[in-house]
Image: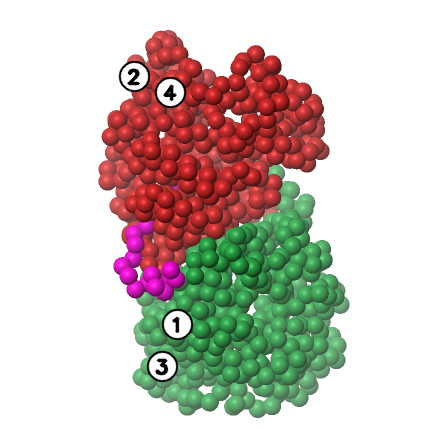
Chain colours: A green, B red
Amino acid sequence: MSPRQIEVSEPRQVGITELVLRDAHQSLMATRMAMEDMIDACADIDAAGYWSVECWGGATYDACIRFLNEDPWQRLRTFRELLPNSRLQMLLRGQNLLGYRHYNDEVVDRFVDKSAENGMDVFRVFDAMNDPRNLEHAMAAVKKAGKHAQGTICYTISPVHTTEGYVKLAGQLLDMGADSIAFKDMAALLKPQPAYDIVKGIKDTYGSDVQINVHCHSTTGVTQVSLMKAIEAGADVVDTAVSSMSLGPGHNPTESVVEMLEGTGYTTGLDLDRVLKIRDHFKKIRPKYADFESKTLVDTNIFKSQIPGGMLSNMESQLRAQGAEARIDEVMNMVPVCRKDAGYPPLVTPSSQIVGTQAVFNVLMGPYKVMTGEFADMMLGYYGASPAERNPEIIKQAAAQAKKDPIDVRPADLLEPEWDKLVSEASALQGFDGTEEDVLTYALFPGVASTFFENRSKGPKSVAKSEAQLKAEAEGKASTALN
Amino acid sequence: MSPRQIEVSEPRQVGITELVLRDAHQSLMATRMAMEDMIDACADIDAAGYWSVECWGGATYDACIRFLNEDPWQRLRTFRELLPNSRLQMLLRGQNLLGYRHYNDEVVDRFVDKSAENGMDVFRVFDAMNDPRNLEHAMAAVKKAGKHAQGTICYTISPVHTTEGYVKLAGQLLDMGADSIAFKDMAALLKPQPAYDIVKGIKDTYGSDVQINVHCHSTTGVTQVSLMKAIEAGADVVDTAVSSMSLGPGHNPTESVVEMLEGTGYTTGLDLDRVLKIRDHFKKIRPKYADFESKTLVDTNIFKSQIPGGMLSNMESQLRAQGAEARIDEVMNMVPVCRKDAGYPPLVTPSSQIVGTQAVFNVLMGPYKVMTGEFADMMLGYYGASPAERNPEIIKQAAAQAKKDPIDVRPADLLEPEWDKLVSEASALQGFDGTEEDVLTYALFPGVASTFFENRSKGPKSVAKSEAQLKAEAEGKASTALN
Ligand SMILES: [Co+2]
Ligand SMILES: [Co+2]
């Protein structure tokens, strides 16, 4: 079907998920944006006509209690109040919830219930291993709460990842009751042709009424074209961030996606005047967080190295700590080896750190001479099934070192009930407010929760620069420039 | 034709014109890049496999003699020497050459001959009014010199501009012997659908062997998708800039365009390792020119206002000079009126300044109470034919004020021979070196040439920051941040 033929018929509506309140500032400024810098944009966001507004997730929760002295549940309730007409959306790490370990099913139920109760509408549920069993319980909990359960596929590239494989995975998520499928390209790896092929494959296989949401970052500079091809293939919703909070490690600009569709037979139906007001708001805010921003706008290295930027800098700092920064090339060559041994997991939190650290260990101490506990767990199935077979030799070593047997059940099946223990531990903390929400905060971030509870009453603090600081800096720079 | 069908056949080669040596630094850093900052990238540029390397034009010529004390002809010869295997490409303003007025045909001939002799291969010839008669002589001169004459269409949007109109214009350029057609989108206005329609229209009408080059800026954030659609419609060559010198008011990133085509049935054939070396080179250079950069990355305002960013800031500073900055909205509403009266010229140098200044005058002093000499000339046909009829009432006023009759001949037909006069005037200048190249420098920039000739022997100077300055600034900023 050529675009010319499309043009004559009624334009098809493509939904937009606005990322500015969560992933945009997570990706651009280490999730540091204070609630006070978002509030004034909410009326326009609520009226712009987005399919959904992403505003919550693991990193926002973590940053709230770790850096901003802000209760993440209060943030959610504030968004609910300020965005009464919007679908609020969050990113949920399946059985990991917003934390870094698997939780017992009861904790998952309680977390999902409380999130729904506090105002969440759309739960984008993913798992770093793409193991559907790690999504299953959370998805069921979302459905039981009467909310939108979005089954998510993490996109990666490897010798075992194929269009057919992704289509099959989508089917497994639909079988478990997914209300929609999210295709999540956290590393900006998704090129236009696979974007087209995979979306089309899912639509052709499971029907055109299967809702597909496409999430791409813009790091490599190719993914706006991928969004276009995904839309041509039938994608229903695409994720963007308002232009003043876009590009680089962030996302494609909302206004540009609106404009690019003009005349194509697709339309977002967004109120562009509203979007431009949102843009103007964040244009003033962004410079206040400049110290948290990376300077790289476009980087296609990942297509060659297969190593996401954040993972690379982690490995570099690990090497530097050992005075071995010169060995980065060896480590980069080791990453594909470790990833293959581990059965080609997608490289996303936490698998990227687990694989990267093991690659550093392998280079510094010899291949698998020392295995990290996490890598051993991954080899033994404690993070879930991997996309391909894992290396049996390394599994044996992992079992010997960790003194554990490999498993092939769903990891959470092995977990004991833990809610009562979490309640009693949380209750012992100074400043604990007696709510289930606080127990969940403790469950997710036990190390940070106690400090946060203690200090909560002091109220939110901002790590942004003030207007005065920005002005002083500009003057300091000008005077240096005169030298 | 769906991408899936394309995939099975041999990929079609799409050429790339690399813009880093001309338009990229013109758009990002006011054309200030010193030759010394480009030299080390040339070996990789020459070997990367570009269709052409754009490296010369009006603004580079101007900046060389005005700011860098560098002979633009020497720059051209250096590029010729450093890029022996590349097609060197320049942007030529038709009968205006690299200046701001129409030149007598003999001057055009001599300029083109000297450019060819000094190493130029591809002449991208355009006219701000899109009047083919203003291209005709320059195109013929290029062909006589045995070089590649690229007939250029400036893209704009107006009630009178249609796909059919652009296709017809392409035909006129082909009739005058164009070796290829360039579609030039200087304001990042070209959306995917018109990109597809116009390229397809030209190919369908004049044959698939007509070479089409597409030039887009990235200001609005939509044009990488437009390049994709242009390629799908048959575009042969697209213009990009290496990623470390891309985006914002510049262009789409070379590596991203290479990568986006993977698996689509199109390929650039570029040597990506070379391109990455070019990127690394300019990644180090760009910060040295940070003071010349604008901070805006994406701006879709032009779709609504129809006013390019540069034109807007011109008008704002004109208003400010009159203490009337508050009247910018009135001026913005006046621009479409003046543009309509002038017959909807594309808004590009110099028409954007001419229309913008008249709009300011109209607001400050009443509609056409005072007409600038340039606007009167435009109304009277002295810049060439306009895309649509001009307002007869305003033509009458212009004639009365300028005491000139309207013309409908090619403006340069009215010009007297001027070469001998230029030679004698140039010869009188201190530091004139007796060459025809120096006469041309004087002809193009009479106001700057004399100072340049006088100072030329002192050699090129850089306006870039030194490493030491960059370091001092970074430290200054850090200490301010500690306040
Ligand atoms: Co993301
Ligand atoms: Co340009």
Q: Chain of mark 3?
A: A
Q: CA distance from mark 1 to mark 4?
A: 59 Å
Q: Are marks 4 and 2 on the same chain?
A: yes
Instruction: Please give the name of the residue rendered at 41% of the width and 90% of the height, measured from the top-left corner.
Output: A405
Residue denoted by label 2: B435
Residue B441 — which label? Answer: 4
B67 horizontally vs A125: left or right: left
Q: Nearer the viewer, mark 1 or mark 4?
A: 1
Q: Are the numbered discs 1 and 4 placed on the same chain, yes or no?
A: no
**CA gap, disc 2 and disc 1:** 64 Å
Name the residue carrying label 1: A163
| Discs 2 and 1 lie in a common subunit | no
- Residue A253 sits in which quadrant? bottom right
Q: Please name which of the two marks, 2 or 1, marks the residue nearer to the observer.
A: 1
Dot 1: within a 10 Å radius of its alpha carbon, few (fewer than 14), some, or many (20 or more) residues? some
Observer-side mark, 3 or 2, equals 2
The disc numbered 4 marks a residue on which chain? B
